Amino acid sequence: MKRFYFVALSISVLFVSAHPAEAMPQKRIPAKAAVIMDSSGAVLYSKYPDARLAPASTVKLITAMVVIDRLKPETKVVISKNAGKVRSIQPRLHADEEYTVSDLLHLALMKSINSSAVALAEATAGSEKDFVTLMNQKAKEIGVRNTLFANASGLPKGVQYTTAADLALIMRAALSYPLIKEILGKKGCLITTSQGRELYLETSNDLLWRSDTMIGGKTGYTGNARHCFVCSVNTEKGPLFFAILGARSRGSLWKSTLLLTEIGTDPNVAESKGKTRLARSSTHPVVK
């Protein structure tokens, strides 16, 4: 069975090299949309790259960039009552606790703590609503044209969407920030509030534990978005960026990423002269 799997994968990879625009049969990647992009912005593989889909917590990459553009990492932030009551996973942040911007970025990027994203938005722009305006401006600055943000966390509130192609571009831009790159590359860290409460964080990126070539990645999940992931991996040809939207389970998310990694790091694909620049669809379909 394993031999058949690798033979099938090899045939599929050859198909990608010969027909880069069509890439592999779409059923090979168990997600709604996916993209492999190199550091120049060339797309090596795509499945519905321009389909508008819910981004979940991958939104926090833009949130982090906007914050770092305007606040110093050591800036102190007090959690507001509004931020403290935002729906989030553990660890919960409490109103009136004080954190540094760096601490809140770790919480947002490593564990997707929604209240930390809202607290950062309020500290940066005064309100989350005004911060969203800055997020959409930032998206345009880095060349993203088919993405719209409605909040700083990725929670399903308002009209909010991205595409696999745009998400890969966002990841490429985010990793140009040394602090973001550092945080996304951490397996764990300890944060201590000004009040002395200790929070130990472990990354939600399981693949960081399995591969030495993984630069870092950002997970996301909501009931509407399903499981999402965007990451970057070091290869002999330089960093590659992988974006996956709408996987049915966390297991299929990792399966999709590993399949994409095999495609992207195959020499036949990486050296293909048929690499195509990102093409924007005029229809921007929504995949359901």
Image: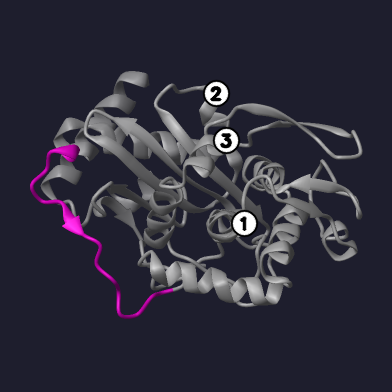
Color encoding of the figure: one colour
Q: Earlier in the sequence, mark 3 or mark 1?
A: 1
* Residue 5 picture location, percent across and down: 33, 27
* Residue 56 picture location, percent across and down: 61, 58
Q: Amino acid at mark 2?
A: Trp
Q: Earlier in the sequence, mark 2 or mark 1?
A: 1
Residue name at image x 67 percent, y 70 percent: 125
Q: Which residue is mark 3?
A: 205
Q: Are marks 3 and 2 in contact (CB under 8 Å)?
A: no
Q: Is residue 215 above or below residue 71?
A: above
Q: Is residue 71 above or below residue 108?
A: below
Q: Amino acid at mark 3?
A: Asn
Question: Seen in the image, is 167 located left or right of residue 122?
Answer: left
Instruction: Say which of 79 and 40 sits in front.
Output: 79
Q: Is residue 133 above or below residue 139?
A: below
Question: Seen in the image, is 55 located left or right of residue 234?
Answer: right
Q: Are marks 3 and 1 in contact (CB under 8 Å)?
A: no
Question: Seen in the image, is 45 located left or right of residue 134?
Answer: left
Q: Which residue is mark 2?
A: 209
Q: Amino acid at mark 1?
A: Leu
* Separation (CA) of disc 2 from disc 1: 31 Å
Q: Residues within 10 Å of mark 3 (few under 14, many from 20)?
A: many
Q: Label 3, secondary structure: give it.
A: loop
* Separation (CA) of disc 3 from disc 2: 8 Å
Q: Which residue is mark 1?
A: 71
* Residue 109 picture location, percent across and down: 62, 45
Q: Which residues are magenta?
A: 269-285
Q: Is residue 44 magenta?
A: no
